[in-house]
Amino acid sequence: MAVAAVHAGGIADHIHPEPQGFVRRYVFSLDHKIIGIQYIITAFVFFMLAGLLAEAIRTQLLNPGGGFVANGTYNEIYSIHGSTMVWLVTIPLLTGGFGNLVFPIMIGARDVAFPWLNMLSFWIFPVSGLMLFSSFLLGAPTAGWMEYPPVSLQGAAGTSMWCAAIFLVGVSSTMTGINFVVTILKMRAPGMTFTRMPLFVWGQFATAPLLMIATTALAAALAALFIERQFGVPFFDPAKGGSPVMWQHMFWFYSHPAVYIMILPAFGIISEVLPTFARKPIFGYKLIAFSSMSIALLGFMVWAHHMFTSGLAPFLQLPFMILTYVIGVPTGIKIFSWTATLFRGKIHYTTAMLFAIGFIALFTIGGITGIFLAAIPFDLHVHGTYFIVAHLHYVLVGGSLMGIFAGMYYWFPKMSGRLLNETLGKLHFWLFFIGFNLTFLPMHWLGMEGMPREVATYDPQFTFWNRFESFASYLMTFAILIFFFNAIWSIRNGKRAGANPWGARTLEWQIPSPPNYYNFKHVPTVYGLPYDFSTPLPYKGLDEELTDSPPVPAGAH
């Protein structure tokens, strides 16, 4: 990213003064970078809790008759596990976490448009999480993360608390979406045109309208379910004239775009990591950018492919099948562009790069199985089986979570000023990558053989593969423990990173690590593209020894 310093303005132009004292600086902070770190830490706490629930699920499935927990408790566990991973881990990490941490710096802004709203949107998030896990005290929901009526109407009181918790998460997400849209539209540095924005910013720009629009459908559905449970208004109860299928329409009108809320920012992370460590401009910049917007738009048009078994009229099923195939086109454009970026690149196999390459492989598998599921006859055969579980995890773990780990290893120096340990990082990657595939790949054929999902006991013929998957999942857990140890150890003992340890060209790497409170002493003017590696940086970076000396941006005056 070629920039030139603008000597008009300075520290006093910051939208709010630098706070004094620990509480104002690090707890109730208005600084987008601190808020991003708060999101990341809080989401990883919930990730650990959700991981424990996942291992309880796999331990239950070691034996056909279960026995680790009661069957009703098992239903509560998988319901809270799924809800946590979607609403308290993946979405907050990718939008509130990495979005707050780096995208304002990437566009040359000193903060987001509405700092107080940003702080409020964060603090709603942990409160929502506490409410969700408190539902265990009242009897947690038992109908999965989707909470289909009529089962969710019959659940214990904790289901109503689930409604309130997810509703609040939606409020937080909507605030974040509004903040990000205004920030991108109004606060880009001079010269930062849309076709000069880094692709991670494009990912956030495509995601923000989804946060604002799709979440309202979920909020309406949650409010209706809560009102029916508490006051008896028959929205979804067929015995009283309601329609349980209406819940599915409202839920999936949100939840299919929500899949892209969980993956578009991860696409952006991959688009930052690959050119940096391949040492060449990303292939098809505009195609990647505009395909993100087309995915966001098409994401609203395919929700009913989740409902082929719900009694949907055949003449309606066909358009949703075709549109699902169509939405694979912009995704395929991205995969092709990323692969072309690697072609003949001077590749550096850092941990971040390994996770980015692993992302491409695993997400491609998830995308291919998604094409299978778009075919109505095949979907009718495997709907409600472990094939769906496998597909979902290849998209959201092999996709979103791999992107999150790539972002952690890439931007950890921007948070802490230190590097994560690369040896531990590569051990983390290989154990996680192997453990993940050994856990979820066999679920495809278990599903095709008819093993139903969300069951505490199963037919003994499926015993071998369930035990195989459970032991493989323990390997994944061990890999994630290595990551947590690496992060905690590196905060104090990691190698100092310097301003730009990777020799990257985007703006966040042209200021100190961690950044000053005000980001830029002088707002930069941008006059180049974000991935121009044709001119070497005039200081040591990835290709040479790491340095603590401040960078001089290429072509700066």
Image (tube, rainbow, N blue to C red):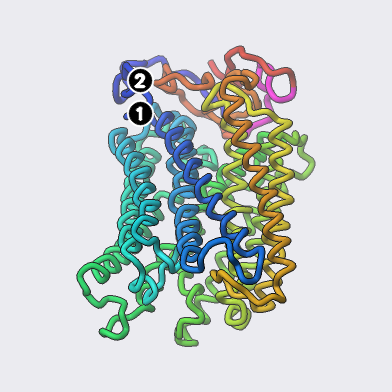
Classify 10 Å Cα crowding around label 2: few (below 14), some (14-19), many (20 and above): few
Q: Check disc 2 and report the residue beneath it.
A: 22
Report x, y in % for residue 512.
52, 19
- Looking at the rendering, the stretch of residues picked out in magenta corresponds to 531-543
| Quadrant where the N terminus is found in the figure | top right
Q: Is 351 located above or below residue 444 in the figure? A: above
Q: Secondary structure at mark 2?
A: helix
Residue sitting at x 20%, y 70% = 231
Q: Main secondary structure of the magenta part?
A: loop
- Does residue 480 appear left or right of residue 105 in this picture? right
Task: Identify the amino acid type marked 1.
Answer: Val
Q: Is 229 located above or below residue 490 in the figure? A: below
Inspect the magenta stretch and tell me whether residue 541 lies in it.
yes
Q: Check disc 1 and report the residue beneath it.
A: 27
Residue sitting at x 34%, y 66% = 156
Residue 555 visible within the image: no
Residue at the top extreme, as displayed: 549
Report x, y in % for residue 414.
54, 27
Which of the two residues, 371 or 4, is positioned nearer the viewer here? 371
Report x, y in % for residue 354.
71, 41
Marks 1 and 2 sit apart, C-alpha to C-alpha, by 7 Å
Q: Secondary structure at mark 1?
A: helix
Is disc 1 in contact with disc 2, using a CB cutoff of under 8 Å? yes
Classify 10 Å Cα crowding around label 1: few (below 14), some (14-19), many (20 and above): some
Residue sitting at x 62%, y 20% = 493
Q: Earlier in the sequence, mark 1 or mark 2?
A: 2
